[in-house]
Amino acid sequence: MPNRISYPTAIAHIDCNAFFASVEQAYNPTLKGKAVLVTGIGGGCVITASYEARKYNIQIGTTIWEAKKLCPKAIIVPSNFKRYLLYNRNLIEIIREFTPDVEEASIDECYIDLKGLRRLHRKSYEGICFDIKETIKRRLGISVSIGLSTSKVLAKTASNFKKPDAITVVTAKDIEKFLTKVELAAIKGFGHNTQALLHKQGIHTPLDFIKRPPEQIKKLLGKIGWEMQMELQGYSVRPIKTAVSLPKSLARTRSFKLSTDKKFIYQEILKNLAVAFWHLRKKKLKTTHLTLMLRSQDYKIYGEEIKLPEELNSEIAILQFFRNAFDRLYQPGTIYRSTGIITTSLHHEDYIAPKLFPNQLETNQQLSLFSKIDQINQKHGSYSIALGPTIHYKNHHPDLSKLYLPFIGTAT
């Protein structure tokens, strides 16, 4: 077992509670407190049920016909994965305000490393987790459960121990006591077959499992089983993975003073586009899917997706798509506080197969131009050269001497 220092490491698992249903309730407050069923493609079965619906024993996979029999007043909502992705990106953005070490496990859960951050935040690790939970609830209107412990497996098990909207802490000295309260089925990775095998060896609880000789566990379950045993004993042998070779998405957001000015808001989101695509080019990535995001004064999130005809990383090439999507998204009279861009379906330039009949939205001249622009902006700072519609930026920053693309507008 680990030494009796309370936190040789400090890892938390953040799990959104009934994520899809919670997002629908946050997006449409009239659904709060009601039994909400989110359906998948075709609408035949439940993919997420709100906690109000789960009281009627409605689970994932329950058919809509069965669910309506169990709860006649249940409200059926079709899934909206674009909306869920927007909430996910905002969720991760909030969490990164507290720690840079975030590993996204799925659209509704992640692991974070808090080690060493007590002095920065001037509170305990549990206090940091509480602040994260409450900030997510205040800004996004959804609740999360958090498990805090010394390893990823323990943190994951702890986050599932009490739901919804709860924090469960398992320090190193409390591990054995905690493992007496959970079953083997509660441990992620212990499926039905693994549980049956362990039962045949006289291992009926997680506590039984961690007390067996490592050699026996290796013989039964191999290296993965040994790692699981170490993690359940409190040793962190599966470190937080904060980077991957090819990201699933890249996001850029900007906050500003509350505004209803369409021109100003378009300028702000255009800056998001410029920075997002600069990062794509820097990483030699291209995208085929782009999501525009506007966040209103009351923190509601609105999104519009663009599906591009080919892989691109030149903002000039998509300006018409972009403007049309923004016009559909913007609602006159709505007060907005921030904008955002999310690029998904990313591909590395080196692995994009040449097309027999390309759309040629990106020309060689454009690619050469942006290569030079990126070099200048890298040397002299963001927006040293920028798209014409962002000229508003200079008007609000008179100390900056900027050059804007003559393709769309110029200023000196």
Image (cartoon, rainbow, N blue to C red):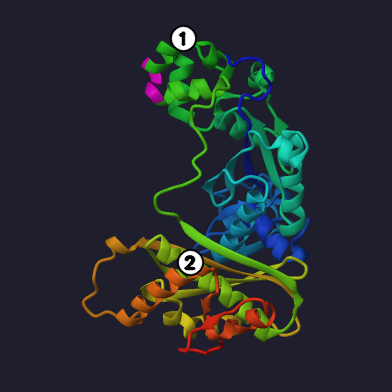
SS class, disc 1: loop
Q: Earlier in the sequence, mark 2 or mark 1?
A: 1
Q: Is residue 147 above or below residue 346?
A: above
Instruction: Give the numbered dot on residue 213.
Output: 1
The answer to which quarter of the image holds residue 128 is top right
Residue at image coords 43%, 23%: 225
Residue at image coords 66%, 15%: 4
* Kind of residue at disc 2: Lys
406 part of magenta stretch: no
* The C terminus lies in quadrant: bottom right
Q: Is residue 229 above or below residue 371?
A: above
Mark 1 surroundings within 10 Å by alpha-carbon count, few (fewer than 14), some (14 through 19), many (20 or more)? few
Q: Position of residue 381 (x, y in %)?
A: 54, 68
Range covered by the magenta-colored residues: 219-223
Q: Is residue 134 above or below residue 89?
A: above
Mark 2 surroundings within 10 Å by alpha-carbon count, few (fewer than 14), some (14 through 19), many (20 or more)? few
Q: Position of residue 193 (x, y in %)?
A: 43, 27
Q: Separation of disc 2 and disc 1 at Cα?
A: 58 Å
